[in-house]
Each structure stands twice: as structure tokens, then as C-alpha cells.
């Protein structure tokens, strides 16, 4: 059937001259345009909404049991890689919770594999029913002071800008380069502007004229607001604010009090980074809906944040509402409190019921995103940390936050003039090893308030350049954990007294497993339990996620990269020892 014939068919269905494909009966329909709840039934044809609230007939019917029919939920900003799952496995994980569309920024794999990594994410996503819209990573690497696997400039990104499934330019984290109109950054912004694409933002702590200059660059969103004032400032300047509820960063409840009937249409829900166990236990975007309503937000406004607002923000044609000719991406919930998805539809096909998938799709891993951990020859001596002085800059862990403290502390040298944890209780040694090109670069630093004792933990998930991070209290275990991660092609490893107590292989770019969400969740849960029980880590700190964000030089205050310590406030490298 041609598109012209299909449209004629849909008009006949809408007019009642022809039976629809499916009729959802005994239901209430969420009208996000009028902020109303309207009695059904709802008719679907050719994967589109035909109409509702009238006497329609259809070839098939589904009794909704008095439930509410909502537009499919949209995640306004997410990094699939941060779930440790491939796109096919991620889709299996979130579709049963009613999320049918995501705006994905693949800058994690972009930092490792460049355009090949982005192409993989596009191709793997197309094999699933989940509607994945890609934002091309704008900051690979995140700053000029990092060593990523690749460097992506405007001339590289433009090669993918017209690919199906590419929606715009991903979060612009290098805000100083926008404010001072650095040529390379401006070329990326102009690339997006020339193709009339949305530009995502990332501007934590930016205020006043600097914020105005940043928005002047054409940047239309921000998901880094943590206070109501930051939120109101950005809405005033015309941005959409994405209210984040991730596994580590949880800003939704802090921002809810600032939502009013006047500004609600400039707010969107997102997750950013979510662990599979968190999703499986508490839900996805429907969790954000539940939290928002529990804390006083009107249910219809909350639903609009998760549907229509996101669709309009990212120019998603046919998404975000229940109206004629819109895609029949829907979920049916029993009530507007729990938002538990009873039925989930994508393009008119029921893909999940009562939390169980009804359809299957293939897994897919490309050779171009494997074998990405490339290290130089290492020894215990590689982790020797000489001290010029006994006063140092140290990174202070802030449990429950990706922020760190910039500490200036006194330490003791050993007999050889080096830093040794044995002489400095409560501190750990931290190393970041360049793992993409075996350059041999190793950044060394000191970590406070993490508390690891008698062992080491190594990871290849380390935002945003994803070099190899290892923390420990002795060099032998640090080396053994690094070697274990290298042998797996990436992942997490816990070593104690030379023995690997637990590990998780992430062979896809050193970031993702091709196992199911439940399998990955179980292995991560085991690792976290072992870390807490056997390594003495600060009980308020996440043993793994704390390390994952320890290298991100766009989140204050002090971070460590493979080139050394980085002062985020001053936006410049800083020496370990204080003269």
C-alpha cells in the first residue's frame, strides 16, 4: 500500500467508514493538549492514532480494564552506554516500563571508537522497536586536556548529520569554548545550525552573562540544573530544562518546586545515566512520573513533561500526544500514581504486557567496537608516586554526588620520598591510564574519603574519555586489577591480596556487555556487595560509580585524567604537590 493509499485508508477509518485495526475499549485517554482525561475508546490503524471518544469499530479489540491510555514516554537525554548494556539489551530493559522513545547521546562510545562507535549505536538501535534518536557528540574529548580514543571535529560529525535517526548535536560540555567562541567549537555549532538541528546543553554552575553568552550559541537545553534558581534562569533565557533522575545524579525532586503552570511547558524528564538494576527495580521514566506526582505535581502536567514537551523540544514528528495521525506509541496504566505499565505499544503493535516483552529482536555487536583496551607494558613501579612536598592537592569524594572537593592536605613521604597509603591512613592512590593508543601516559593522584583498604578496583568506564581508572592501597593489587580488566577487553575488576574477587566483562568498547539487563544487574550487585563487605569503602559512597565520574573534567572541583590533576573551577591542570 502506498503512503497516499494508506492516508486515504486512515481517513476512512477516522470517518467510521472502515474498521480500524485495533480498538482499545474501557479506557480513559490522556489529552496532553487540553490537559484533560477523555473517555475512550481509542482506535488505531496502520500504526497511527485514528481517533478516540467516538463509536469506532475495529478488526480487534483490547479491554483496558478501565486503565489510562498515555502517549509513549520519552527520555529527553540518556547515555545508553552508561547502563552497561548494548542498544538491543537496553531496549529490552526499558520498553516494558513504557518508554518508547529516547534521545541518546553516544559520546561515551564516541570517545572510544569515534564515528565507528556512533555508527554501531545507530545500526544496533535500528534493530529494535525502541525509537532511538541520536545526538552527535559535540565534545570528543570533553576538554582539550584529555586523551580520548578519538577526536571528532565538525568535519567528522557532518558525515552523519543526515543519517536516519540523527536528531542534532549532543550536550555541549565545553562551555568555555562557546563563551569565548573557540573556532573548533563554533564550527560544530554552525554545522548543527546549517542543518537546522537541535543543540543540547550542559552548563553546571554557569551564571550571569556567561550563561547568556552560552545560550546565544543556539544551545536549547540543559540537564545539569541542581537548584531552582538555575532552572528558572535557563527557562528565562528560552532553554528547555531537563529534570534528571539518574542512578547517581538525582535532581528531579530539587527542581519540582520551581515548576508552575506558566513554565511547565519548558520542562522535560530525563535519566542521563541509569544502572540496569535501578531500572529493573524502580522503572524508567515512569519512575520519574511516580516521584513527581508523589511530591505534588499534577499528574497531567507530569505526563506532559514526559511526552509532549520532549517531542516538541526535539522536534519529534508524530510523537508525544494522542491525536489523529500521530504514531500509536502508547502505554496503558492502571492509575496515575504508580504509573505501572500494563500494556505498551509501538507503532500500534503491543510490545510488552505486565512487564513482559511480547516481541523479540536480534542482538548485534560490530567488530569495530571490540578489542579497545590497549595498554603499554606495566609494572608495580608504574604506580610509584613521588612527592616533592608533603602538602598536596587531593580529590575529596562527596558521597552521592559526581562533584568532588578540591582538598589541600598534608601527607607523609616514605623512606624513598614516595606516597604510600600505609603511611597515610584514610587516603588511597588513584591512577588513570591512557587505554586507547598505549601511549604510556598515567595520571597519578590521591583520593580522600573513599576508604578502600587492602586491595584495588579497576574500571574502563570513566567519563568521558573512558581511560582505565584504578584505585588502591597497594601497587601489586592495582597492577593485578588492571591486568584483569585488560584481559576482559574492558570492565570492572576487584582485586585483593593478588586474587580477583569479582569482575564484570564489558567487551563492547570497554563500556558495554552483550548480556541481558538482569545478568548485568546481578553481576554488578555481586561486585558492589563484595566491595562494601571486603574493601572497607565509605558506606555512603558507591564503590563503582564514584570511580566512573572521577575523571570528568567538566564537573567541579578537582578531577584526574591520564595527563594529571585538573582544576575544573580554574579550567586548567594543577600539580599534585603544593610548593
Image: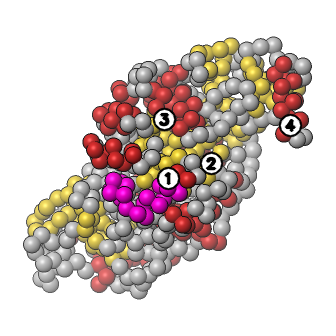
396 lies above or below 57: below
Residue that badge 1 annotates: 170
121 lies above or below 344: below
Find out whether the residues at labels 3 and 1 contact each other: C-beta distance under 8 Å.
no
**Secondary structure category for the residue under label 2:** strand
Residue 328 horizontal side relative to residue 447, left or right: right
On the image, the x and y values in percent for residue 241 come to: 43, 37
Residue that badge 3 annotates: 268
**Secondary structure category for the residue under label 3:** strand
Dominant SS of magenta comes to: helix
Q: Which residues are magenta?
A: 175-192
**Secondary structure category for the residue under label 1:** strand
Residue 372 horizontal side relative to residue 446, left or right: right
Q: Please tell me whether mark 4 or mark 2 is closer to you in this view.
A: 4
372 lies above or below 85: below
Residue that badge 4 annotates: 4
Residue that badge 2 annotates: 132
Label 3: few (<14), some or many (≥20) within 10 Å? Answer: many
Q: Please tell me whether mark 1 or mark 2 is closer to you in this view.
A: 1
Marks 4 and 3, how far apart at CA = 34 Å
Q: Please tell me whether mark 1 or mark 4 is closer to you in this view.
A: 4
Task: Of the two numbered discs 1 and 2 on the same chain, state the one appearing first in sequence.
Answer: 2
Residue 155 horizontal side relative to residue 331, left or right: left
Marks 3 and 1, how far apart at CA = 16 Å
Task: Of the two numbered discs 3 and 1 on the same chain, state the one appearing first in sequence.
Answer: 1
| Residue 187 lies in the magenta stretch | yes
Task: Of the two numbered discs 4 and 2 on the same chain, state the one appearing first in sequence.
Answer: 4
Task: Of the two numbered discs 1 and 4 on the same chain, state the one appearing first in sequence.
Answer: 4
Label 1: few (<14), some or many (≥20) within 10 Å? Answer: many
Amino acid at each position: 500500500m502506498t503512503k497516499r493509499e494508506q492516508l486515504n485508508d486512515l481517513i476512512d477509518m477516522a470517518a467510521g467508514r472502515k474498521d480500524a485495526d485495533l480498538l482499545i475499549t474501557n479506557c480513559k485517554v490522556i489529552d496532553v493538549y487540553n490537559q484533560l482525561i477523555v473517555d475512550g475508546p481509542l482506535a488505531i490503524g496502520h500504526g497511527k492514532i485514528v481517533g478516540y471518544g467516538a463509536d469506532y469499530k475495529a478488526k480487534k479489540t483490547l479491554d483496558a480494564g478501565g486503565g489510562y491510555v498515555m502517549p509513549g514516554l520519552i527520555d529527553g537525554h540518556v547515555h545508553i552506554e552508561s547502563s552497561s548494556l548494548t542498544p538491543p539489551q537496553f531496549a529490552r530493559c526499558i520498553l516494558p516500563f513504557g518508554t518508547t522513545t529516547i534521545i541518546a547521546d553516544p559520546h561515551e562510545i564516541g570517545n572510544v571508537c569515534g564515528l565507528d562507535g556512533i555508527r554501531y549505536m545507530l545500526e544496533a538501535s535500528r534493530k529494535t522497536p525502541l525509537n532511538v534518536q541520536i545526538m552527535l557528540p559535540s565534545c570528543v574529548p570533553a576538554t582539550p586536556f584529555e586523551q580520548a580514543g578519538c577526536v571528532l571535529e565538525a568535519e567528522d560529525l557532518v558525515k552523519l548529520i543526515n543519517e536516519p535517526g540523527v536528531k542534532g548535536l549532543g550536550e555541549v560540555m565545553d562551555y568555555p569554548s562557546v563563551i569565548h567562541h573557540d573556532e573548533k567549537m563554533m564550527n560544530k555549532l554552525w554545522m548543527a545550525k546549517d542543518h537546522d538541528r537541535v543543540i543540547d546543553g550542559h552548563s553546571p554552575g554557569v551564571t550571569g552573562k556567561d550563561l547568556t553568552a552560552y545560550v546565544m550559541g543556539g544551545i536549547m537545553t540543559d540537564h545539569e540544573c541542581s537548584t531552582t534558581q538555575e532552572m528558572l534562569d535557563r527557562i528565562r533565557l528560552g532553554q528547555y530544562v531537563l529534570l534528571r533522575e539518574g542512578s547517581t545524579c538525582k535532581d528531579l525532586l530539587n527542581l519540582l518546586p520551581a515548576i508552575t503552570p506558566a513554565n511547565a511547558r519548558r520542562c522535560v524528564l530525563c535519566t542521563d545515566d541509569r544502572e540496569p538494576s535501578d531500572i529493573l527495580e524502580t522503572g524508567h521514566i515512569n519512575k520519574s512520573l511516580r516521584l513527581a506526582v508523589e511530591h505534588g505535581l499534577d499528574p497531567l502536567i507530569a505526563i506532559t513533561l514526559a511526552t509532549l514537551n520532549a517531542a516538541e523540544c526535539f522536534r519529534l514528528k508524530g510523537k508525544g500526544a494522542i491525536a489523529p495521525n500521530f504514531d500509536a506509541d502508547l502505554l496503558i496504566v492502571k492509575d496515575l500514581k504508580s504509573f505501572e505499565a500494563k500494556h505498551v505499544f509501538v507503532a500500534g503493535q503491543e510490545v510488552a504486557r505486565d512487564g513482559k516483552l511480547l516481541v523479540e529482536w536480534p542482538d548485534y555487536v560490530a567488530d569495530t567496537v571490540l578489542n579497545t583496551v590497549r595498554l603499554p607494558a606495566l609494572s608495580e613501579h608504574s604506580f610509584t608516586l613521588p612527592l616533592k612536598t608533603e602538602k598536596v592537592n587531593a580529590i575529596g569524594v562527596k558521597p552521592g554526588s559526581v562533584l568532588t572537593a578540591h582538598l589541600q592536605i598534608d601527607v607523609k613521604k616514605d623512606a624513598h620520598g614516595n606516597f604510600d597509603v600505609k603511611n597515610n591512613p584514610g587516603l588511597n592512590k588513584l591512577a588513570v591510564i591512557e587505554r586507547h593508543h598505549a601511549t604510556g601516559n598515567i595520571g597519578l593522584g590521591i583520593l580522600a574519603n573513599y576508604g578502600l583498604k587492602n586491595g584495588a578496583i579497576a574500571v574502563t568506564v570513566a567519563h568521558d574519555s573512558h581511560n582505565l581508572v584504578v584505585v588502591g592501597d597497594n601497587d601489586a593489587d592495582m597492577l593485578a586489577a588492571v591486568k584483569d580488566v585488560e584481559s576482559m577487553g574492558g570492565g570492572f575488576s576487584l582485586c585483593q591480596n593478588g586474587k580477583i574477587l569479582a569482575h564484570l566483562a564489558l567487551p563492547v568498547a570497554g563500556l558495554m556487555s552483550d548480556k541481558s539487563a538482569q545478568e548485568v544487574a546481578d553481576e554488578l550487585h555481586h561486585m558492589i556487595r563484595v566491595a562494601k563487605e571486603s574493601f572497607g569503602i565509605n558506606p555512603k559512597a558507591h564503590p563503582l560509580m564514584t570511580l566512573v565520574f572521577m575523571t570528568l573534567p567538566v564537573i567541579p572541583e578537582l578531577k584526574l585524567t591520564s595527563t594529571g590533576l585538573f582544576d575544573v573551577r580554574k579550567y586548567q591542570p594543577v600539580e599534585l604537590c603544593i610548593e
